[in-house]
Each structure stands twice: as C-alpha cells, then as structure tokens.
Image (cartoon, rainbow, N blue to C red):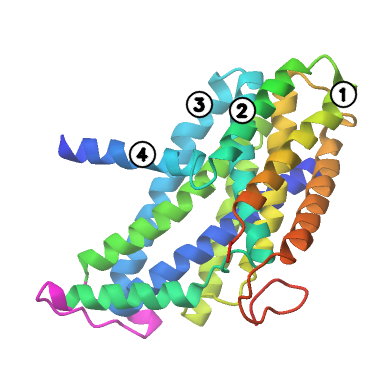
Amino acid sequence: MTAIVRALEAFAKFWKDFLIGDAPELLVGTLVFVGAALLLRHRGDVAVVVLPLIVIAFLAGSVFRGRATP
Amino acid sequence: MTSSTIVLALAVFGASAVEMVEALTIVTAAGVTRGWRSAIEGSLVATVVLAALVLVVGVPLARLVPIDVLRVVIGALLLVLGLDWLRKAVLRASGHKALHDEDAIYAKTVAELSGTAGAAGEEAPVAMTARGSWRRGPRDATGFTVAFKGVFLEGMEVVLIVITLGASSGHLALASCAAAAAAVVVSFVGYLVARQLSEVPENWLKLAVGIMLTSFGVFWVGEGAGVHWPGSDLWILVLVGVFAATAALLSLAMRRTAPSRGPVAAGTGQRS
C-alpha cells in the first residue's frame, strides 16, 4: 500500500512539475490559447494572426518574469 | 514524407538526444563509481519500461480517443512543454540563467555515489574500466537504482513527446523510431568516449526543439478546435519561423539586462 501511495505521489509530482514547474503563467497562457482557438475557430483569418500573438505575449511575459535580478 | 513529418521526426530526435545526454551523465557517474554492470542493466530495464509505456498509453490513445479531442489536449501539453523549453533556452542564451553543466552534474553525482558506499559501511564495487568485461562485474543495487531512475526520469519527457506528437499526427511509429535512433546515437557516442558528453550544444538543441514543440502545439490545438491553417501542414513551417524569430529577438533584448556571468562564446550562447 505504501509503495502504491509513493508511486501515486511521484506520478502527481511529475505532472505538477511538468504543467506548472517554476512558470505557472505558461499553463495559464496555454489555457487562454485553447479558449481563444475554440472561440475563433470560425474566423480563420483572425485566428491565424491572434493565436500566435497570444503565445508570443505569454512567452515574452514569462521570459521577462524569469530574468535574473541583481 | 511531408515537410511536417520531417519536422516532427527532427523534433523528436532532438528532444530525445538532449534528454539522453543528461541520462548518460548519470549512467556514466553510476558506472564509474558503482560498477558498469549494474549501471547498464539499470539503463536497459528503464528503457524497456519506457518503451512499454509508449505502447500501453500511446497506441490506445491514438485509436480510441476522437482525433479532435486528442489534438486539443495533446496540443496543449505540447505547447506547455515547448514554451517551457523555449523560455529556459532564451534565458540561458541571454545570460539570465546558468547553462546546463554536464561536468558539474557528473562531479556531483560521483561525489554522492562515492559517499554512499562509505556511509553504508560497504565497499563500492570495483568499477570495471575494460568495456568488454562489464558483464562479469559485480552487481550493485545503488548503481542499478541510480541508473534506472536517471534514464527513467529523463526518458519520461521523451515518452510524452513521442506519444503527443506521434498520436496527434498519426505517426506514432515514426516518432518512436526517431526517439530510439537518438537513444542509440547518444549511447554509442557515450560508449566510445566512456564519459559524459559536455561538449554537446545542449542549449541550442533545446532552443530548436522548444521552437518545434511550440509550433506543433499551436498547430494541433488549432486543428483540433476547428481552425483552418492556410496551406494545412505547411503552416507548421511558418509557425517555426515565427517562433524562431521571436526567440532570437527575446534573447537579444534580454541580453541587455543580463547580470555579468563571465565569458560566453560569441554567437553560440555557450560558455567558453
């Protein structure tokens, strides 16, 4: 039982580290992206421009947030 | 073979190579300090378990889950992973984060494993240096466990990439072969040099793979949601170009505010 609990804890930790890690804003950005894709699926001309811009915005924000401060 | 298939194979190969280099460092440290037999056996068992995971999870996913749902969910996972790799690679390239140092990781692992032998009151088994004699060497539980965990943990991201890219594109076999090829290449080179591969330009590889995974993630989420990308699969190449340009601009912009970290080899972002 202890081994099963430990395995489940390790599994949960893997997914938490994978999805959140030290940049939870990337998960938020991905969810916003998915929502936007679903909303804009019938407006391909707008989606083609807006969707990559959403990703770029969250990436830039995350990089800026992760910068080393003196 | 379409252009998107080639990019897919390259993305899986690159990601697998990066993770296998990191795993090789741990396996080498375990082999040198605890004996090659257990280190190699631990690595092989972990590889078999990872391959089984791809079959047990990947094949049913590709066959049973509706393709649009699969693409949205898997595309989102790819996007999270790709953005994380891209973020870290940009921060390393611009000097805001230390480069991944295989030599330092190797030294730390060797120190920990050498210390384990004394602390437990046992002697570390004699590490066989002659490659042909590893099968006759003594077995060591610590060496086996360290090698197994190293390969398994590094390999889990590879499994995730193989399953996500392979299942959503219908090329699970190709993705698996690309990952296996990378593992073979890195293992072979590691066997030849018999040490950690600290000269591999890891950050460049992570940057390239991050760009490709992000592009695939954006593409597949869009496809699954019903967005019609112009030129269909060819749009992946456009996305690769867009995110490559973004990464380059971000790296340049962030370099201006990087704290001084010592000399960095010009044009590569790698430490000299």
- Image marks 1 and 2: residues in contact by CB distance under 8 Å: no
Residue furthest to the front in view is A70
Residue B135 visible to an observer of this rendering: no
Q: Earlier in the sequence, mark 1 or mark 4?
A: 4
Residue type, mark 4 in image = Phe
Determine the chain carrying the residue at label 4: A
* Place of residue A3 in the rendered image (x, y in percent of width and height, measured from the top left): 19, 40
Disc 3 to disc 1, C-alpha distance: 35 Å
Q: Amino acid at mark 2?
A: Leu
- Residue identifier under label 4: A11
Q: Nearer the viewer, residue B180 or B249?
A: B249
**Label 2: how many Cα within 10 Å (few below 14, some 14–19, many 20+):** some
Under circle 3, the secondary element is helix
Pointer 4 and pointer 3 on the same chain: no
Q: Are marks 3 and 2 on the same chain?
A: no
Query: Which residue bears the numbered disc 2?
Result: A31
B48 sits left or right of A37 in the view: left
Mark 3 vs mark 2, foreground winner is: 2
Instruction: State the residue position of label 1.
Output: A46
Q: How far apart are the alpha carbons under marks 2 and 4?
A: 22 Å
Judging depth in this view, the residue of B10 and B19 nearest the camera is B19
In this rendering, the answer to whether A42 lies above or below B14 is above
- Disc 1 marks a residue whose amino acid type is Val
Q: Please tell me whether mark 4 sits on a helix, a strand or a loop.
A: helix
